[in-house]
Image (tube, grey):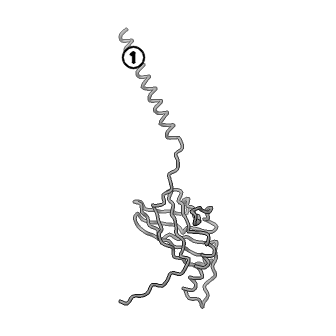
Amino acid sequence: MALKNTLLKIAAAAAGITLALCIAAACALWYASKPKPPKPWNSTALTASDAPSFVAYGKELHIYLRYEVQNHTDNDYSIDKNQRVRVMGRYPNGSLTTPMEGDYINIEFPLFIPAHHTAMMSIEITGVVPVAKEAKQTDEEYHEQLRALLNKVGSAFDGLTVFDEDNHYQIDLPKWKTTKPEDKPQTKP
């Protein structure tokens, strides 16, 4: 009888342990399968602090905004056309437009920025076609004509914001200089 009681106690303990393990596994499975909130947008991983340079070229004369973007992370940053990247206009009050990529604005791909380095990011504006440079125009005069066109079509914007959905990076791009920078006085050596 003592052996039978011992076996019953062992069987009851094993059943209790098995039940506890099943409950723990079910809780772990439930916790792993419950939806996780998305991580917040990281707006400090990649930054552009200066106004872009801009130029128009190509057969269709698209305008290109060229930004120097700093990678502050410990990882190389690389994107190509297959990734989910959205470009949106940013109003002075901080609100955003609907995504503009494709029809009006495109990022020049591929883009690669090594960890802790700065590289160029080019935004191609396809929805605005500037006039070709006239033979009598200087490069400076044509550049100011492009600035006037950008000011006209982008007057409502305070800049652009790029959202990389795969990395959850938000890259705030400043607006171009709306007025011609003053020439720096040259110093004599």
Please provide percent x and percent y for residue 53.
51, 76
Quarter of the view holding residue 131: bottom right
Residue beneath label 1, please? 9
Find numbered disc 1 in the image and state the secondary structure of the residue it sits on: helix
- With respect to residue 180, does 7 lie above or below? above
In this orientation, which residue lies closer to the viewer: 87 or 114? 87
- Residue furthest toward the top? 1
**Residue drawn at point x = 53 percent, y = 59 percent:** 164
In this orientation, which residue lies closer to the viewer: 39 or 17? 39
Please provide percent x and percent y for residue 80.
52, 63
Please provide percent x and percent y for residue 38.
52, 50
**Residue drawn at point x = 53 percent, y = 76 percent:** 177
Total label count? 1
Mark 1 neighbour class, 10 Å CA radius: few under 14, some 14 to 19, many 20 or more: few
- With respect to residue 109, does 30 lie above or below? above
Residue type at tag 1: Lys
Q: Quadrant of the N terminus?
A: top left
**Residue drawn at point x = 57 percent, y = 61 percent:** 86
